[in-house]
Image (tube, grey):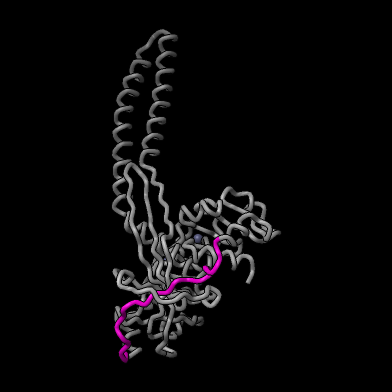
Amino acid sequence: MTLQEFTAAVLITRGALADTDGSGLHVVAPPELAARLGLHEYQHLVFEPEANPVITGRPEALRVDYDSPLVEALGGLLDPRSRLAFVEAPLPPLKPIDPLRELERGVTVRNGVMRLRECASVTTTYLCFVLEYEALADERRAGLLELWINPDARSVAEWPGLLETATPRDYLLVSDLGPRLQTASMLARRVAGVMARHDLNDLLESLDRRRARDVRRLREYFDGIYQEIGRKAKRATQPEARASEMRRLDATRDAYLGRVADVIERYRVQARIWPVMVVGCLVSAYQLRVELLRRRTKSDVTFAWNARDRAIDARCCDGCARPIHAADLCDDRAHWLCPACLAPCPECGRPYCGACHQRCPRPHR
Ligand SMILES: [Zn+2]
Ligand SMILES: [Zn+2]
Ligand SMILES: [Zn+2]
């Protein structure tokens, strides 16, 4: 276990989200945990001694090595708690299914072909993340999200109310969960972002509408004044009177810009999401191994069929993690993609895969 893996495991079991990428760990910690560890609620932990100075110079970046105070603070949290609580949830027993039929019923590939390779009944791990989100604008909005994530299938189940009926069972050592915990944590963070934005959609739209209305009113008001002064300036025969009207014009324009900036500030949204808890649950499910074929490429993916929904879970888009049942595949690697992650580039109009590329790979003039 590397220092980075250790850090991720401790943080995740204490309710933080830790997302690994090539440059370290992106951590979102609940406020009390962040305070105990002396971290900001969002922090980018960098473990590489040779890390890029551009990254380590950012305010959210924190270098970590074995001598860091953070590592000592993590040790203080540890005791027997590098374990994750598991619950038992009342789920119906698995009945036999026709896997081909279930695949056709529950999954759509719009521009390719699926081939079922194997279907096995398994006991699989779901990790339940409860996250809270908050948006502050001219009003405050908050909510809770409960996501049941199957890291093996990279899928999300929505089982509202299940956690309340679950009973505590055992603890599992984090080391036995391996990379599942990190995959699930990364998916939870991204899926929660997508869902919170969806829940807040009416708020965001109403803010846009009100901002546009206020800016329009300001413009009408200041236009009137501006034109009035402009007319006076034209009529003015004395150079001094004219210069004075010109100064008033400038002052009016500055006042207008200042008021517009105030309006934009007033409707700015500050949103954040933080994890409240994570527990595991062992679930009997079917695991379907499927080949996704697109022209000459293919990818192997796993789908999960769960007995509560009697259906295949929504699988997270390989680009943005949005859970979807219908996908397009990319030409190069047959990634599983939502429409937004295979959308046309705004500059050249040709679609590109959001999982293969962060931005359009074609040269633009
Ligand atoms: Zn996507
Ligand atoms: Zn392009
Ligand atoms: Zn791709």
The location of residue 185, given as percent across then percent down, is 47, 67
Instruction: Please state the horizontal and vertical placement of residue 203, each as a whole percent of the image.
Output: 30, 50
Front residue (pair 345, 87): 87
* Total residue callouts: 0
Say above or below: 280 vs 273.
Answer: below
Query: Is residue 165 found inside the magenta-colored segment of the image?
Result: no
* Residue 358 percent coordinates (x, y): 52, 62
Q: Nearer the viewer, residue 201 or 287?
A: 287
Please say whether residue 95 is one of the residues in the magenta stretch.
Answer: yes
What kind of secondary structure does the magenta stretch mostly adopt?
loop
Q: Nearer the viewer, residue 142 or 217?
A: 142
Q: Residue at x 63, y 49 (%)?
A: 57
Residue pictured at 43% horizontal, 67% vertical: 278
Q: Is residue 329 visible?
A: no
Residue at horizontal 43 percent and vertical 22 percent from the top: 250
At 67% from the left and 58% from the top, the residue drawn is 51
Q: Which picture quadrant has residue 364?
A: bottom right
On screen, residue 241 versus residue 332, left or right, reads: left
Q: Where does the image place residue 299, in percent across and percent down from the top left?
A: 49, 80
Q: Is residue 197 above or below residue 93?
A: above
> What range of the chain is rendered magenta?
77-97
Give residue 260's quadrant in the image.
top left
Considering only vertical position in the picture, is 79 above or below 269? Answer: below
